[in-house]
Amino acid sequence: MTTSPLGASGETSLGHTRNAPEDLSLVAGRDPLTACVHCGFCLEVCPTYQLSGDENNSPRGRLRLWREEAEGRLEPDPFTAAYTRECVGCLACEPACPANVPYGELLEQTRHQHVATGRTRVPFKLRVAAWLAARPAWFQTAMLPARLLRRFGILPHPLLFGGRPAIMQSTAQYADQLMRRHRPTGPRVALLTGCLMESLFREINFATVRVLIENNVQVLVPTGQGCCGAMQEHLGLEGVDQLRTRNRDAFLAAGVEAVVTNSSGCGLATGTALEGQLPVRDLLDFLGDLPLKRRVRPQNGARVYVDLPCHLVHGQRVAGIPPAVLDATGYAWELAPMARDCCGSGGVYNLQQPANAREILSRKSAFLNDAAGDPVILATSNHVCLMQWNSAGRTGLIQRPYQVRHVVQLLDPGD
Ligand code: SF4
Ligand code: SF4
């Protein structure tokens, strides 16, 4: 348990009257900041509160700090910025809230204000990564060595999981080739390829194309698309609106029924960009509406444990991964214990707050040490969650062999 410099409920600041600081003036006038009724229902779902037992490290506590600063009752305080940085951004507090406090939106605005006013510094290497991610051609080139290393099975970082990405052929080229060969006639969708997914984990995009086309879906990959802006949003950096506009333009011009995304964090960000204009569907949720081809596998003891990404169930408010989709993998499967709880990845949270992220993962991943199955497969549907789960083995949290796979790879005719 950590000791809060502001006391158990932040009360040392109460009654302290000042003018609202200029950087928070936008937040000060917003009703959402005052919507919290202090019921505390959000506390039990919050991983940072569970970890610390510190009220300031909970949704209710952070909202109170932000509101007190906005109303001028608390001077801009380094501890407010620190507690804001401690938030994983998992959004588990939103569906738990009876007052419908738009916590994620408030968090996003506060992060941007803290970075813009210098209260939070973004490490140089993360600024560079975000700058590159916003420029797809540059990012593809910068990640070429990492793509090559994965291709040849060299995984120098705990977050890098195994796979064989194409080195030069893009997902757009691959989809075009398969579309010409198979000529599907069903629903026409556009695929968001993503920045990190396309640069580093491209084999998952290829598997996505194969599964969609095998199930008679027409797949377009608009080449004008780019990064969804989730990384910039997590870091509190500028440029999110421009990235959303670029993707909005690219997808609206594609003449499709929906955009399909295979990473839940990117899906949430793209859904915001296209809200009210074009449906954005999580890939597995979309596949759940189709009469899926089912894989036939020998029942040889393999067992899949399914984890549900926060940005799927809390952010996009999708009920989960449809059981019919999981059945279609042909594997014996079950939901992982604590499947709806955060794994600690939080976009780039595991790079910014590695100790917290590891602690959150440690509680959630411990079951794998004794899980039945040979092989044991941990499957989910967000690349940053796959990276985080992979790190559990590489950093000694899990002492037995296991695989991490995107669920679409388990449906893949090439699997
Ligand atoms: S987003 Fe997650 S970590 Fe942040 S306050 Fe809400 S539940 Fe806690
Ligand atoms: S659940 Fe909502 S209303 Fe209740 S304390 Fe948390 S943020 Fe406030």
Image (cartoon, grey):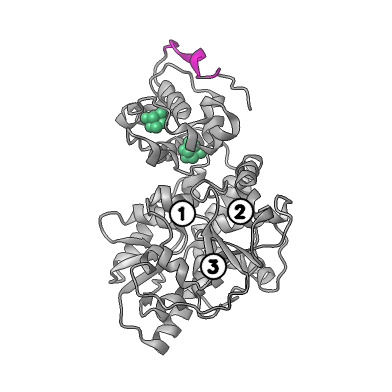
Q: Quadrant of residue 149?
A: bottom right
Callout 3: helix, strand or loop?
strand
Question: Label 1 vs label 2: CA separation?
Answer: 14 Å
Assign a secondary structure to mark 2: helix
Residue 11 belongs to magenta span: yes
Q: Residue 265 got which mark?
A: 1
Q: Main secondary structure of the magenta part?
A: loop
Q: Is residue 57 visible?
A: yes
Q: Which amino acid does the dot numbered 1 rest on?
A: Gly
Residue 292 found in image quarter: bottom left
Q: Is residue 325 magenta?
A: no
**Residue at x 72% of width, y 51% of height:** 395
Q: Which residue is identified by label 3?
A: 332
* Kind of residue at badge 2: Gln
In the picture, measured across the screen, residue 329 lies left or right of residue 217, that is: right
Q: CA distance from mark 1 to mark 3?
A: 27 Å
Of mark 1 and mark 2, the one earlier in the sequence is 1
Which numbered disc, 3 or 2, marks the residue closer to the eye?
3
* Residue 366 percent location from the top left of the image: 65, 49
Work out whether mark 3 precedes mark 2 in sequence or the reverse, and give the earlier one: 3
Q: CA distance from mark 3 to mark 2?
A: 23 Å
Q: Residues within 10 Å of mark 3 (few under 14, many from 20)?
A: some
The N terminus sits in image quarter: top right
Highlighted magenta segment, given as a residue range: 7-17
Q: Could you classify mark 1 by the number of other residues whose Cα lies within 10 Å: few (under 14), some (14-19), or many (20 or more)?
A: many
